[in-house]
Amino acid sequence: MIIQPTSLAALTWAGAASGSAAQSWRIGSVLSARPLGVSAQGLQVLQIGNLTVETDVAGGQLPAQFQVRVLSLGAQPQLEMLAQTADPVLQRALRERLPQQNGYAPLLATLGALAQRPVLRQLPPELRAALAQLEQAMHNPAEITRGEGLRTAIERSGLFLESLLARPHGAAALPPDDWKGALLRLAALLDRRAPASPVQNGGDTPPPLLQRGLQAQARAPLPLPIPGDEVVPLLDRLQGDVRAALARIEVAQLESATGPLPAWMIEIPLQGDDGRDVLQLQLEYTVDTGDGSRGWNLGFALDLPALGAVHGELQLREPRLSVRLWAAQADTVHRLERQFTALRQRLAACGLLLDQLSCQLGLPEPPNRYSAVLLQATA
């Protein structure tokens, strides 16, 4: 694809080309580029190198980040869009982990079944301690209803374990209830007991979480009782569930490092009074294509036995906030709408201007975010 800028968004081309901002614009130079939005005249606004330009791009939607090569200069330079190439190390890591990953619901069901087995008390002390530490790494619903509690749950979701370890004295300051840390300790003990079996991928490999969008995870049924109440089959199942959960976290970590703007998919296991659930969060830094304003989007998905699947999206452009909710059950829609007055009052007390607050019956369509990285990773 050839990109031919027609004008600069803030400067004249002649003036910019003679200044320091265009020193890297030489024939043959390769520059980073990303779309910023659409101008009032319907032209695509791009940031290319240090300059912001307007161009009439033919050939469909541009990727979030790409590279161009300068073919010619002058009043209207010509740029060649280069084919995207992903980091081969990242591709290889995704290829290895995508077939292994799975949601947390099967793991939580296996843990629940183990907790009901009297023979659990006969396990080696270090294995029982690792199971207890994994239980401790789960949060209760009351904790995440507070801002600080939710922040702590996100920080200890396992997604940021390595960044914590990389800090000075990181290993000493690592919280014992980090979810990935607890999974790694349990996996090491289970692997010592019996080597993990290789994963057999018999079907299509699902894409990474950010490309699938939010998906509420219902509780998995407890494993059926085993004749003789043997614990070995449950430990074998637990070993596979732990490895799948670790692969899930590592796929999310790899994917969060690839986008041009910060974005994370975070999953938090919750310990309720009558069972365990999974809260899924999607946090993205965004740039509005219309006015260039910046802010954050927070999405969430949760499937509770009493409510069914619930999705939500909060768009924050301080001081303005939009809140949209979806529920799979009509009764849940009515229950949520009855809380709207109290929610408006609490948001107003925080100084936020509420642009939208709605709840719809049904669940939103997941976004189509398939990328070249995904296609190469699952080939």
Image: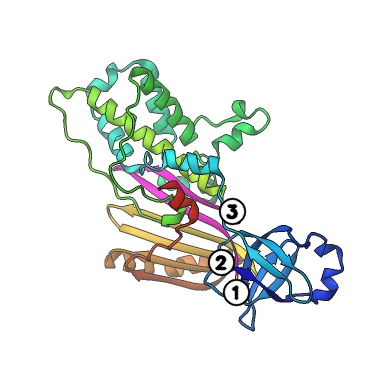
Type of colouring = rainbow
Label 3, secondary structure: give it.
Answer: loop
Q: Circles 1 and 2: CB distance less than 8 Å? A: yes
Residue type, label 2: Leu
Q: Circles 3 and 1: CB distance less than 8 Å? A: no
Locate residue 169: give its quadrant.
Answer: top right
Q: Name the residue under label 1.
A: 57
Label 1, secondary structure: give it.
Answer: loop
User: Which range is magenta?
Assistant: 262-288
Locate residue 245: give its quadrant.
Answer: top left
Q: Name the residue under label 2.
A: 62
Which of 376/286 is in front?
A: 376
Numbered label attached to residue 262:
3
Query: What percent of the width, then of the height, locates residue 251?
Result: 46, 43
C-alpha separation, residue under disc 3 versus residue under disc 1:
26 Å
Q: Main secondary structure of the magenta part?
A: strand
Nearer-N-terminus badge (1/2): 1
Badge 2: few (under 14), some or many (20 or more) residues near its Cα, within 10 Å? Answer: some
Nearer-N-terminus badge (2/3): 2
Residue type, label 3: Pro
- Nearer to us: label 3 or label 1: 1
C-alpha separation, residue under disc 1 versus residue under disc 2:
9 Å
Residue type, label 1: Val
As drawn, the residue found furthest toward the bottom would be 41
Left or right of residue 197, residue 230 in this image: left
